Image (tube, helix red, strand yellow):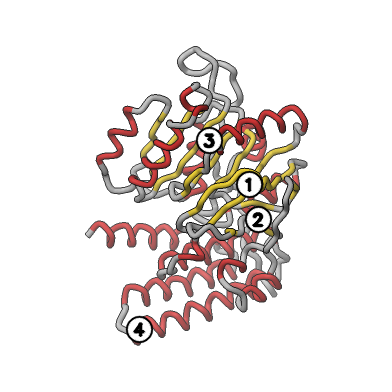
Amino acid sequence: MALAVAALPARVLVPRSGSRTSRSGISPPRLSVVIVNYGHWEETARLVRQIRQSESSRAGTIEVVVVDNHSPPHPWMRRLRRWPGVSLRRWGRNRGFARAANEGCRLSQGDWVLLLNPDVTLEADFLEGVLALADQLSREDPRAGIVGFHLRNPDGSLQLSAGPYPTLAGTLAGLALPRARRKYRVFRPRRRGRVPWVTGCCLLVRQECLRRLGGFDEDFFLYYEDVDFCRRARAEGWTVWYEPALRVIHHRPLHLRTVPAPLRFITRHALLTYAGKHWPEWQVPFLAGIVFLEAWFQEQRAARRGDTTSASHYAELKNLAADLARGRAHEARRRLARVVRREELRRAS
């Protein structure tokens, strides 16, 4: 009989309830920008500097919260702490994007939170446009919870940033598509419109929506937490919007990068976790079987070229697929934590 991944309660850090007085006793910022950093201090500092140079930041309407997932120390840490309007929270270990994003949202004070990846560049007046949009949605649509934006690749081409919910059929069909189109769909709306979900690399979310949903589901270490969050938001009556008029450049999307074994481990864990939450019960072990076969094939390739480190990661991925096929989500998360820790130690050596 088919077994599904156990649907476990999300372990979240719930954002603070709204208060109209900041810690300093003055009016709080209208917008909180949350940046999750892992090993990209220079990019994070560049983005924070760009935010601080904006007219809205100089007017005191924006705060910046940086949450670092146990990156190696860097001189930029001290400089960021000295900048007005910027707070930095460092953790002693890498707890994943979802948990770090929740921590940043918990520390934020604005009615709206803008999540940004460190590797984005904002186009001129982007933040002013976001503030105007947030004000408009606050007045006109009290159920508007999430907004995604127009993304561009570094060469100026369109970067897909929204799509339908992932399904087993769509996932299998996507194997024949370019990586950039497996999770997203091509669409070029000229006006703002509702969509099923938007990517988390540049995502505006109402603080109340975060609070009601309990933040991102921390069962996701990295990837698919944005799809899950949008899906849960819509199920609770919130609307998800795509705004093409406001643009950012995203420099290092996943589909433009090589995918080493540890990252493939993380992405497959995320997909299987999503499937366990939202797909029919029988489909999870079916998908896990495909992941198992993929891991076996990649393990053989790595072994033939003498890459014992990658081969060991793919062997662990086979075990993870077997765990999730049998509903052992806790054991799968422990495997994920071991792989992440092993990779951190390898990089530090």
The relative height of residue 52 versus residue 176 in the rendered view (above or below) is: above
Q: Amino acid at mark 4?
A: Ala
Viewport quadrant of the C terminus: bottom left
Q: Is residue 22 visible?
A: yes
Label 3 crowd bin: few (<14), some (14–19), many (20+), radius 10 Å:
many
Q: CA distance from mark 2 to mark 3?
A: 22 Å
Question: Of discs 3 and 1, which sits in the foreground?
Answer: 1
Label 2 crowd bin: few (<14), some (14–19), many (20+), radius 10 Å:
many
Q: Amino acid at mark 3?
A: Cys
Q: Amino acid at mark 1?
A: Gly
Q: CA distance from mark 4 to mark 1?
A: 42 Å
* Apparent side of residue 181 relative to residue 119 in the rendered image (left or right): right
User: Which residue ends up furthest to the bottom in the rendered image?
Assistant: 304
The relative height of residue 45 versus residue 84 in the rendered view (above or below) is: below
- Residue, disc 4: 303
- Residue, disc 1: 148
Q: CA distance from mark 3 to mark 1?
A: 17 Å
User: Which residue ends up furthest to the left in the rendered image?
Assistant: 349
Label at residue 162: 2
**Secondary structure category for the residue under label 1:** strand
Label at residue 105: 3
